[in-house]
Image (tube, rainbow, N blue to C red):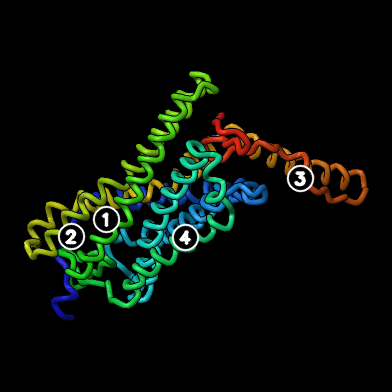
């Protein structure tokens, strides 16, 4: 084992409890939320709602990320990678890739809401199912392509003679620092600016809209500010610390002493990024009253079908399969937070 495969050791007892707890909670809540969201997203897509395409890709990205968390939970609990070099490459690849695909799709959702709210008439040619699928495809190609380098490198390092770390080298290699510059300034900062601009523009537009009541304006504003706040809290601290580490490693001023001071902040902020995958379904899909009604309708239909089946079996009659009538579904499905009126250049809750 050469020096390139050796990393500075940093024993910290609290890490073996804190991080497995965070990842376990995110896995349980995120899995429940995203799996539940699949049904709602299917309704969006079936009704040709453009936002449904972005929500579907966001949900897919979150689920792939969430499915890596059990292995990451075991790893952080033991502070020792026990799954081999190949698994380290694969899990680390999807863990990092889907972090940035999630960021990108959150930005796409913000832009789509901005166009549908501020420019409802002029954006019709841009806001269609085909264009949304092409945009999502481009996002996946960029993210997967730029992160494919992880699959060609050995990212398993020795912290001590008997302990191995996956994707945690302190200080980091120079090639990793250069890749981090791209991830920070292109795949994070640009989506951050677009998301903040889009939601702030929507807030400005609704406050100048005479068709909305004050209560509705306050509700929409609060939800949009929550979306901005959660995005910033989950992702900004990590990328600030990541830039510090990357710059210090790039100019060769990083040492084990410096890393020992930065590492606690780095690992805590890194764990914070996982919270977004658990919160995404609740802040991007379930917040709408119309979506809540749809979920209740679906649950009610399932319950009625089960009750009817039980009743018919009890009475000795064959169970007649019921088919959901699409005409009974509510027509005014909410597009995430906002309901865009496609026929009039105005916004309503």
Mark 3 or mark 4, which is nearer the start of the sequence? 4
Q: In this view, does 348 lie above or below 73?
A: above
Horizontally, residue 268 falls left or right of residue 305, namely left
Horizontally, residue 82 falls left or right of residue 7, namely right
Horizontally, residue 311 falls left or right of residue 110, namely right
Report which residue position mark 1 lands on: 184
Spatial separation of the CA atoms under disc 2 and disc 4: 26 Å
> Residue 330, located in which quarter of the rendered image?
top right
Q: Which of marks 2 and 4 is in front?
A: 2
Spatial separation of the CA atoms under disc 1 and disc 2: 10 Å
Q: Tag 4's secondary structure?
A: helix
Mark 2 or mark 1, which is nearer the start of the sequence? 1
Mark 4 or mark 2, which is nearer the start of the sequence? 4
Residue 292 visible, this orientation: no
Q: Are marks 1 and 2 in contact (CB under 8 Å)?
A: yes
Q: Tag 1's secondary structure?
A: helix
Q: Are marks 4 and 3 in contact (CB under 8 Å)?
A: no
């Amino acid at each position: 084992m050469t020096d390139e495969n050796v990393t500075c050791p940093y024993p910290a007892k609290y890490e073996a409890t804190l991080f497995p707890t965070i990842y376990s909670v995110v896995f349980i809540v995120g899995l429940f939320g995203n799996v539940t969201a699949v049904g709602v997203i299917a309704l969006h897509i079936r009704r040709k709602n453009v936002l449904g395409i972005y929500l579907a890709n966001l949900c897919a990205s979150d689920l792939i990320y969430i499915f890596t968390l059990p292995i990451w939970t075991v790893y952080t609990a033991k502070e020792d990678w026990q799954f081999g070099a190949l698994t380290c490459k694969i899990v680390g690849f999807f863990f990092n890739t889907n972090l940035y695909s999630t960021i990108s799709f959150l930005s796409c959702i913000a832009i789509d809401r901005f166009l549908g709210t501020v420019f409802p008439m002029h954006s019709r040619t841009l806001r269609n199912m085909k264009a949304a699928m092409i945009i999502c495809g481009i996002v996946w190609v960029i993210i997967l392509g730029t992160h494919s380098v992880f699959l060609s490198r050995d990212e398993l390092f020795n912290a001590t003679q008997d302990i191995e770390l996956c994707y945690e080298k302190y200080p980091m290699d120079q090639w990793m620092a250069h890749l981090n510059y791209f991830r920070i300034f292109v795949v994070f900062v640009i989506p951050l600016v677009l998301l903040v601009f889009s939601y702030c523009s929507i807030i400005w537009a609704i406050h100048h809209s005479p068709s909305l009541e004050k209560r509705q304006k306050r509700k929409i504003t609060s939800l949009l500010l929550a979306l901005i706040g959660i995005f910033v809290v989950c992702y900004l601290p990590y990328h600030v610390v990541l830039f510090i580490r990357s710059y210090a490693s790039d100019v060769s001023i990083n040492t084990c002493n410096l890393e020992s001071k930065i590492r606690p902040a780095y690992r805590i902020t890194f764990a914070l990024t996982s919270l977004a995958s658990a919160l995404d379904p609740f802040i991007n899909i379930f917040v709408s009253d119309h979506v809540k009604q749809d979920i209740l309708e679906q649950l009610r239909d399932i319950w009625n079908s089960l009750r009817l089946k039980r009743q018919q079996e009890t009475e000795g009659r064959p169970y007649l399969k019921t088919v959901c009538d699409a005409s009974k579904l509510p027509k005014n499905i909410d597009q995430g937070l906002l309901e865009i009126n496609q026929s009039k250049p105005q916004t309503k809750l």
